[in-house]
Image: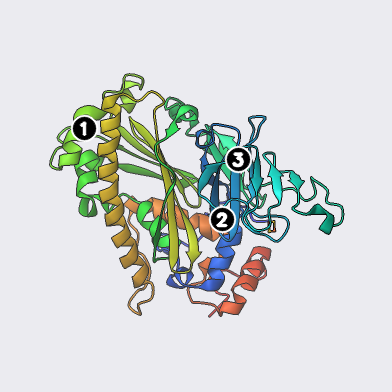
Amino acid sequence: MNTHENIGGHLPKDWDRKGLPAWTYHSPAMLELEKQELFRSHWQLAGHVNDVPRAGDFFTVDIADERAIIMRGEDGVVRAFHNLCRHRGSRVAAEKSGHCKNALVCPFHGWVYNLDGTLRGAARPQSFGPLDKTEFGLKPIELEIWMGFVFIRYLTGAQRSVAEMMSVYAPELTEYQLEDILPTTSFTDMEIAVNWKSVRDVDNEGYHVAMAHPALQDLYGSTYYDLPYLNGVSRSLGRFNPHAGRCWSVRNYVAIADRQPWLSEDKRNLWGYYGLFPNLVIAVTPESVQFYQEFPLGVDRTLIRGAVYRRPEESRVQRVARYLARRIDRETYKEDIQLSIWSNESMKSSAFDSFHLSDLERGVRSHHDHIRAVLPVTTLVQRPPEDRIAALNDAMWEGETEPHTAVA
Ligand code: FES
């Protein structure tokens, strides 16, 4: 069994500043291992309980070849199921989100499911043998609700609960009353033509902020710092620069954003980013909360998904501040996407040796350490044959093959 939270502290010293080898960014066999050992085996944020406030509300999310539907039942319970009809596998819900009155009807042949996932009945039932309502119900997915956020996990593994992992940061997040936040729009998603790790690499460090993000640099400048991933969680904080104002959005945002009387003084000028390995960030600002995450669609294709939430009783000033914060974020996303593309392209170049990471990029290093701990085959500098990658990884887990020397 993989010890997902052993962050792999025994790498040789000369690996400390290196990133994962380039081959891991464009290997189909590697991606299949990542889907299984990272995406299906780790908690994935699907949404928030307030995305499904009424019985019959649902939303869907696709993760690493799996499809989920999160739905509130008539008993008020939020459940997660595979979005997969038990007849021939159609999606039972095709939309990203929606509402069904008191049952889900499969769009293929019309099998009907209750809101608790049990089968209500098949179309033309006499054409089947007996159908047990539970046996042929939607297959449940493990679910955990933490501070209102709905997490799902396809494969139960060694990873602790979200609440346990996030307990180190829970005290400082309690004040944001995350259970009460409300969605502002539906989930957003955007496809980008790079490997998912290149997206995460850029987001995992603030070293590039001064050069690449004029608005963020204006907003919090040198106050930004990262606490790298430790036991699956990370944190980055930036505090408003008292001299902020070169950028229009930042100037106007800072002028009003700290007027949040419900927050302690200490948090009124703070943007905080809380990471959960392998692919999630929950970001809190004085006026709003958002999450963003990456899902691999292919070796060179990634879906960036997210949502923005607001205070339950949002004042006009908070609404304007939220609008301005999103303007700053939009600029940042655009800049980060370009950086991800350049970084990912470089992995195919003969001139690319490896990352050489600074102390300010500990977030990248610690994320890679977490990946190495789960997938030891990523410690091999030279690319193994594609058809041996999975077996090598297993062998390295079993201790049959020495890391770093297995493939010459
Ligand atoms: Fe759903 Fe046939 S696949 S009813």
Asked whether the residues under the numbered discs 2 and 1 touch, taking CB atoms below 8 Å apart as contact, a structural biologist would say no
Which residue is identified by label 2? 39
The numbered mark, 2 or 1, whose residue comes first in the sequence reads 2
Is residue 181 shown left or right of residue 152? left
Extreme top residue here?
261
Residue 265 at x, y percent in the picture: 31, 22
Q: Amino acid at mark 1?
A: Val
Q: Badge 2: how crowded within 10 Å, few (<14), some, or many (20+)?
A: many
Cα–Cα span, label 2 and label 3: 21 Å
The numbered mark, 1 or 3, whose residue comes first in the sequence reads 3
Which numbered marker is on residue 220? none
Asked whether the residues under the numbered discs 2 and 3 touch, taking CB atoms below 8 Å apart as contact, a structural biologist would say no
Q: Nearer the viewer, residue 219 or 190?
A: 190
* 292 versus 311 height, above or below: below
Is residue 138 shown left or right of residue 203? right
* 362 versus 29 height, above or below: above
Is residue 118 shown left or right of residue 297? right
Whether the residue carrying mark 3 lies under 8 Å from ligand 1 is answered with no
Q: Badge 1: how crowded within 10 Å, few (<14), some, or many (20+)?
A: many
Q: Nearer the viewer, residue 208 or 307?
A: 307
Cα–Cα span, label 2 and label 1: 37 Å
Residue under the image location 52 percent in, 67 percent down: 378
Residue 112 at x, y percent in the picture: 70, 47
Residue 177 at x, y percent in the picture: 45, 26
Mark 2 or 3: the one toward you: 3
Which residue is identified by label 1? 254
Which residue is identified by label 3? 71
The numbered mark, 2 or 3, whose residue comes first in the sequence reads 2
